[in-house]
Amino acid sequence: MGGVARARQTERREELTVSPDQITYLTEGDKDWTRELRAADTCLKLMKLCGEWKELCPDARAIAIQMTDAEFAEFREGLLVQPAGEPSDRWLLIYSPIAMPAILFTASITAGQFKVPWGCAYIRLEQVKPQWWTDAKAKARGKTPRQPEGTI
């Protein structure tokens, strides 16, 4: 795996995981995800990848774990032709959370705006806007963000 992955020994087997505590200021999480996503050439490999990145890409994982082989073929075709042509609106609606998981996407946009490495943007989002970032991660996981006290 790329720059953010570390091998972690579990009781049953060695398992690769990518987690927020492994991100440094120079981590290129968006590039690592894109490279590994393009390399996932089977539905099973995509599911494994999304499991490894579950903390940073929960929205991608939620779709991938339910995917059939036929849906994977449709996803893969759209992913690989995207640079040459435009994927359909249907493809974007269904599969864009895999191509651009919300957490990675938000940090990428911020990195681009401020011309800083992806890891720096991710860490600063956690530091400067902790509640906003926690809410963004909760939304990506399909959960309701915590409401401030006194709101209905």
Image (cartoon, helix red, strand yellow):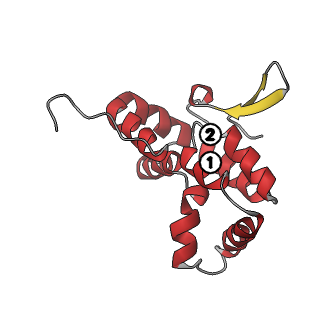
Residue topped by disc 1? 61
Residue topped by disc 2? 54
Task: Quarter of the image for the N terminus: give it.
Answer: top right
Give x and y (percent) for residue 86. 58, 79
Residue at 54% across, 49% down: 59
Give x and y (percent) for residue 82. 64, 73
Q: Which of 122 and 41 is in front in this view?
A: 41
Task: Quarter of the image for the C terminus: give it.
Answer: top left
Q: Which residue lies furthest to the left in this view?
A: 150
Give x and y (percent) for residue 58. 56, 44
Question: Up-down: is 128 above or below 108?
Answer: above
Is 44 positioned to the left or the right of 53 in the image? right
Q: Nearer the viewer, residue 134 or 122?
A: 134
SS state under label 2: loop
SS state under label 1: helix
Q: Do the residues labelled 1 and 2 touch (CB within 8 Å)?
A: yes
